[in-house]
Image (cartoon, rainbow, N blue to C red):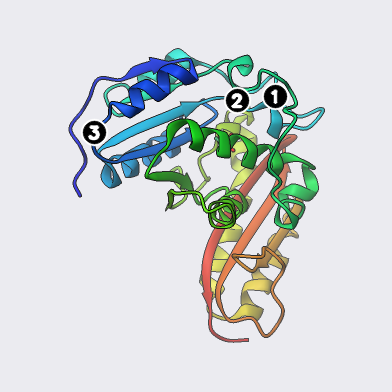
Amino acid sequence: MTAAPVRDTVLVTTIEELRTRRAALPGTVAVVMTMGALHAGHLALVARAREVADHVILTDFVNPLQFGPGEDFTAYPRDLEADLAAVDGQVDLVLAPSTEEMYPVLPPTVSVSAGAAGRVLEGAARPGHFDGVVTVVTKLLQITAPDVAVFGQKDAQQLAILRRLVADLNLPVRIEAVPIQREGTGLARSSRNAYLSTDGRAQALALSRAIAAAELAAPSLGAVQAALETARQDSAVAWDYALAVDPVTLAPVGPEHRGETLVVLAGYVEGTRLLDAAVVSVTAA
Ligand code: PAF
């Protein structure tokens, strides 16, 4: 399907109005969920959404449930005007609800659990984060009732957990994954890059270098793991993990593992937590 023509973008702030307007959209609908601070990575999600559906809803909501105490919920960049300008004419509806609209009671009395996969990797560093993500995503899917939900592969663990959410709860939506968007330097695009100084951005390239080395080392699992071990020696990043994991269970793979393998990295540069990821195919020890 080719990209739909440019359309009028309408800003909606209430769930009721969103439901009314969504019901009036003929044909298929794709949703792109964001926390705002839109950058080229988000625009790639919007572009993909336009290719796979007749209409696009973008949600712009900084979800308090997925931030832990001491995380950057209050400082998280918010600029609705800039976000609207970035997607004007590219999406049909922008849902930007208040916290009270989304959570009349906070924390909600009923919420969704991401299970064991939500407690490893990012979940180990950020307890409760993925429970907050799956709760808001479930709500936004109920509100927007899309045929397709488009997510980025950069948040690889989030994507894996959302695939499980949709499968385990039989949610009537197809998940469409979009490859990581990178700057010319290789740095994975992220709203959090805004926190980095020029030096920090240069130091952060250790993550994309590690990904490139792991990709080059495939299809040998041993070589991929050796490349990740070498990457962890780079002191420009305060590494949390650099691992080859099973793409479904997210558990580190054993020496017998073959097939699709997720390479996941996380570390801090100038106090900002950065992520990178790649899917590689492993066919040898
Ligand atoms: O990926 C994000 O930006 C968020 O986790 C999401 C999916 C919009 C839920 O708040």
Task: Report crowding for label 1: few under 14, some 14 to 19, many 20 or more residues within 10 A (C-alpha).
Answer: some
Mark 2 or 1, nearer chain start:
2
Residue 238 in view here: no
Circles 3 and 2 in contact, beta carbons < 8 Å: no
| Residue 284 sits in quarter | bottom right
Q: Secondary structure at mark 1?
A: loop
Task: Report crowding for label 2: few under 14, some 14 to 19, many 20 or more residues within 10 A (C-alpha).
Answer: many
Residue sitting at x 45%, y 42%: 183
Mark 3 or 2, nearer chain start:
3
Depth check: give the residue in front, 154 or 46: 46
Depth check: give the residue in front, 11 or 201: 11
Circles 2 and 1 in contact, beta carbons < 8 Å: yes
Q: Is mark 3 within 8 Å of ligand 1?
A: no
Q: Is mark 2 within 8 Å of ligand 1?
A: yes
| Residue 139 sits in quarter | top right
Q: Which residue is mark 2?
A: 62
Residue 15, percent from left and from top: 49, 20
Q: Which residue is mark 3?
A: 26
Task: Report crowding for label 3: few under 14, some 14 to 19, many 20 or more residues within 10 A (C-alpha).
Answer: few
**Could you say which disc has been placed on residue 73 in the image?**
1
Q: Secondary structure at mark 3?
A: loop
